[in-house]
Amino acid sequence: MAKVGFVGLGIMGAPMAGHLIDAGHTLYLYDIKPVPAELTGKGGVACANATEVARQADIVITMVPDTPHVGAALFGEGGIAAGLTPGKIVVDMSSIAPVETKEYAKKINALGCDYLDAPVSGGEVGAKAASLTIMVGGPETAFETVKPLFEKMGKNITLVGGNGDGQTTKVANQIIVALNILAVGEALLFASKAGADPAKVRQALMGGFANSRILEVHGERMVKRTFNPGFRIELHQKDLNLALNGARQMQMSLPSTALAQQLFSSVAAHGGAALDHSALVKALELLANHTVAPDA
């Protein structure tokens, strides 16, 4: 059994840490908010700061919202780096910028420790069900050491390449998801405005080549008007910003990604930033002056 540190115990982090405790690992825990009682109640150890977590644990996992939060958790006052000794492993499971990830890895490596970037896909549902997809960048030896922990939190676990490649894969994932939501939204909106029953159209499409997980899950949300998150629009906006900023640095164009981001921004401007990302369809509905289905 490993001594594991976990920094960041929000919607995703808390259930992920819980699975590791359930598996018999010793967990040292820190969050800017009080550590959830459900975790300490089953054996997790609350720490005063991230430095204490790193002193106690051999493997330290971070799961925080964005790039600056990871930087602060690692290198800020009371951060993880101050508690590290050579031979430990830092695993960032947040979704952040690949370029900064490579810089963070170099700084951790300079302390004699390995670094893995291991962002996830699957959202709150996947975190609770331990069915997350985990995309990993970093050295293979560190990956093999941490893999038994990943297997308690997810199902599809892939070492993609070196540091930064895990985050690059996550950005690619978010591009695909956003454009699939856009495609499903346009298709169901077209069918509805043409007079067809969007629920039956969705059912028919699920039996053919157009079927997808997005059509199955988010198509249903669009028809039933259930836009409670899930995965919030504001978080998907953050991920698409990573894609568009990266594309700008590489001097390439991602026109469809830019369109999806603008549509998310439209929904956010109408007060929908905290809605599920399937609510992107609301921007299309405004343009069409028609809704896929009546609001409940």
Image (tube, grey):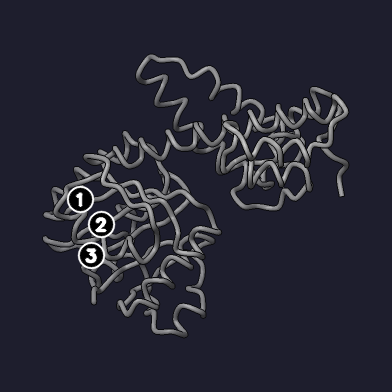
Q: Are marks 2 and 1 in contact (CB under 8 Å)?
A: yes
Nearer to us of marks 1 and 3 is: 1
Q: Which mark is residue 108?
A: 1
Residue type of the residue flagged with mark 3:
Gly
Q: Amino acid at mark 2?
A: Val
Residue 256 as seen in the image, left or right of residue 120: right
- Tell me the residue that label 2 is attached to: 90
One can see residue 72 in this view = no
| Mark 1 residue crowding within 10 angstroms, few (<14) / some (14–19) / many (20+) | many
- What is the distance, in whole Å, between disc 2 and disc 3 at their CAs? 11 Å
Kindly identify which residue carries mark 3. Answer: 83
x%, y% of residue 142?
18, 55
Q: From the image, which quarter does the N terminus lie in?
A: bottom left
Q: What residue do we see at 39% from left, 84% from top?
A: 43
Residue 26 in percent (x, y) is at 30, 78
- Quarter of the image for residue 154 reads bottom left
Disc 1 or 3, which lies upstream in sequence? 3
SS at mark 3 in the image: helix
Of 120 and 247, which appears nearest the observer? 120
